[in-house]
Image (cartoon, rainbow, N blue to C red):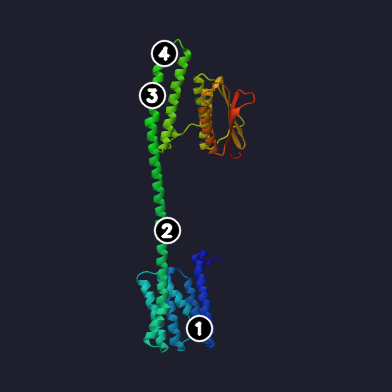
Amino acid sequence: MDLIKLPLKHQSWLVAAVCMAVDGGLVLLDGEPPAQTAVVLLMTLAVDAMLAGPARLSLWVAVAQAVVPVVVLLSWFNGADSNDAGLLIAGYRAGAWLRGAPAWASLGVLSASLMATMFLNGYGPLFAVLVAAKGALLPWLVGRYTTARRAYLAELEKQSAMAEKDAKAAVAKAVTEERGAIARDLHDVIIHHVSAINLHAGAARLGTPEGDPKLMTSLRAVETSSRAAMVDLRHLLDLLHGDKSEGARQPGLDNLDELLDGVRAAGTPARLEVCGQRRDVPESVDVTVYRIIQEMLTNALRHGDSSGVTVTLQYAPDSLTVAAVNVAGRGDDTGAVRRGLVGIRNRASMFAGTTRSGLDPDGRTWRTVVTFPLEAS
């Protein structure tokens, strides 16, 4: 059993019990008459039991310990051993727990008791001083040192905690500043160009004759997409600036209808099928699935034919599968396709998701499937 882990009260009782056993045993082995031994034993056990008391009573414990050997010698003059161990512990307690006048008073009464017993036993002043230094001053100083060391260690722990807190604050500040710099770059560069796309598309639509409805639809789709991109960018900027308000929330599965409407406005049929019982998913996964579907639809717009794209959400007890199916059409810019698939794969891998994509056996249907593991319902 680790004695250090015992409560202080239990440790105090243990120390008192050991002192009672040691001092009481020495009294019994001293060989004095039974009546005298019984009186000395009772006094010794009583003052040693006081060592289990509260620390605030250490002065009175020291006084009681100091009185016993003097009383014994004045009563019987035989130099009987009584409470030597109790005197040592009383000196230590006084040095460890007391401050100011009570601490010095405890040291004084213990030293005076030891010196008095030496004088009563016929020893000289020098011997009496040395005994007082060994039995009273030394334990008192050890108690003083122990308390000072405990306070020093506590101060070191406090300084270490403050340094760790300051380091975390510095890291958080650096991250905030870096996010602010990224947000400024996004605002100054990306938003500027997206705004220009929106303005030019609007100007082109207003300057185009009404006789070409397909061109008008495409221009409206450009305007709508650029405005949606502006909204998403502003959400990202809010997040980078640390804005956690509802307005700064990134789009998720609840916004899929808006995403599909944007694709339909561009002239490509888009369908959403949901299989299984819908369930809540973690917000981070929710945002990631939305972005993956956004990339799937973008790939279908760029490289699919006019038959459109079908997106399927399949909920299982322990997974969520997202699939996009479209007929391969325009085969140009395969590098863009590859980059889009790499982006999808990277997003999925952040949540232990698996990705597979490619042509079906018919050689025409392109299928992209991403599966996310979820905790079982």
Front one among 212 and 277 = 212
State the separation of the CA atoms marked 3 and 2. Answer: 57 Å
Tag shown at residue 208: 4
State the separation of the CA atoms marked 1 and 3. Answer: 105 Å
Residue positioned 38% across, 37% down in the render: 181
Q: Do tag 1 and tag 3 residues touch (Cβ < 8 Å)?
A: no
The amino acid sitting under disc 3 is Ala
Can you identify the residue that label 2 sits on?
157
Front one among 358 and 136 = 358
State the separation of the CA atoms marked 2 and 4. Answer: 74 Å
Q: Is residue 177 left or right of residue 345?
A: left
Q: Give the mark toward the camera: 1 or 3.
A: 3
The amino acid sitting under disc 4 is Thr
Q: Quadrant of residue 93?
A: bottom left
**Badge 4 or badge 1: first in the primary sequence:** 1
Can you identify the residue that label 1 sits on?
39
